[in-house]
Image: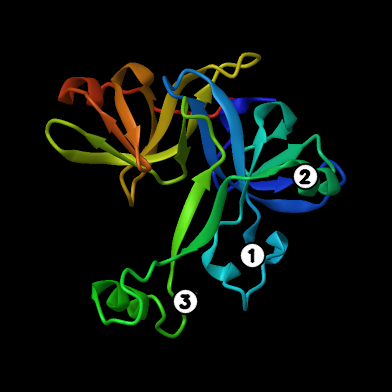
Amino acid sequence: MKLEDLRPGASVSSRDGHKLGTLSRFVLTKDLTALTHVVVDTGLLRSGESLLGGGWALSHDRVVPLGVVDDVSPAAVTLTMTAEEFRDLSVDYIQEYFEPIPDEKKGWPDPSDLRRLAASIPGEPGPYFMLQTVAKSPDDVDIKRGSPVWRMKPHQKIGEVDGLVVEEGTGKVQAIIVRRGHVFAKDVELPLRFVAEVVADIVRVHISDDALKQLREHHPQA
């Protein structure tokens, strides 16, 4: 099993042959040195969420530790879990819940009433705030497929995340695979020493023109 073959968008299946969803994110330690978990987007139909209850607008991501990844190819991932174990033991990666918008002055028109009215338009859940909690440690970051990669100086997009180069046996991340170009796209390996931060699904890097040109093209090993 080659962990660097893990690619967002790959089909994820249980060991008893059931499709669980698609690989949507990687969870790494904050210093980006180790891959710890993977996130599976189960989709609305597999999530069990009610369409009428607003399930179409909610996250359907489930997170599992890297240790349950059994077999990997760029297009498919198999877990050691059965479909039932995945349902019972995986964790909602993003938990969404609603809190009512308080009426600051009950019985009197005030600015809070406008917010409550705006949140009650047809198709919305009512006069509520939607809040989220994410099932990852404060010491972890996540990177999803297609996350943009931007240079800090000059402020320039250099590509999008297409995967990770991971050391076998340790889960240690050696580089980020960046898809560059559109019509004649190619994957290059961006060593972690160039990464400045990962915030709000954006990877920011410090890299010179010369270093950018010299990035090694990524060719998946057979």
Pick the residue in front: 54 or 62. 54
The spot of residue 88 in percent (x, y) is: 79, 46
Which label is found at residue 148? none
Residue sitting at x 37%, y 20%: 192
Q: What residue did someone put label 1 on?
A: 44
Q: Quadrant of the C terminus?
A: top right
Residue sitting at x 77%, y 44%: 86
Pick the residue in front: 38 or 118. 118
Left or right of 199? Residue 46 is: right
Left or right of 149? Residue 52 is: right
Categorize mark 1 by other alpha carbons within 10 Å: few (<14), some (14-19), many (20+): some
- Label 1 SS: helix
Categorize mark 3 by other alpha carbons within 10 Å: few (<14), some (14-19), many (20+): some
- Label 3 SS: loop
Which label is found at residue 86? 2
* N-term mark: 1 or 3: 1
Closer mark to the observer between disc 1 and disc 3: 3
* N-term mark: 2 or 3: 2
Residue sitting at x 62%, y 16%: 168
Closer mark to the observer between disc 2 and disc 3: 3
Of the residues shown, which amino acid type is indicated by label 3?
Gly
Of the residues shown, which amino acid type is indicated by label 2?
Phe
Of the residues shown, which amino acid type is indicated by label 1?
Leu
* N-term mark: 1 or 2: 1
Residue 222 visible to the viewer: no
Separation of residues labelled 2 and 3 (CA atoms): 33 Å
Q: Quadrant of the N terminus?
A: top right
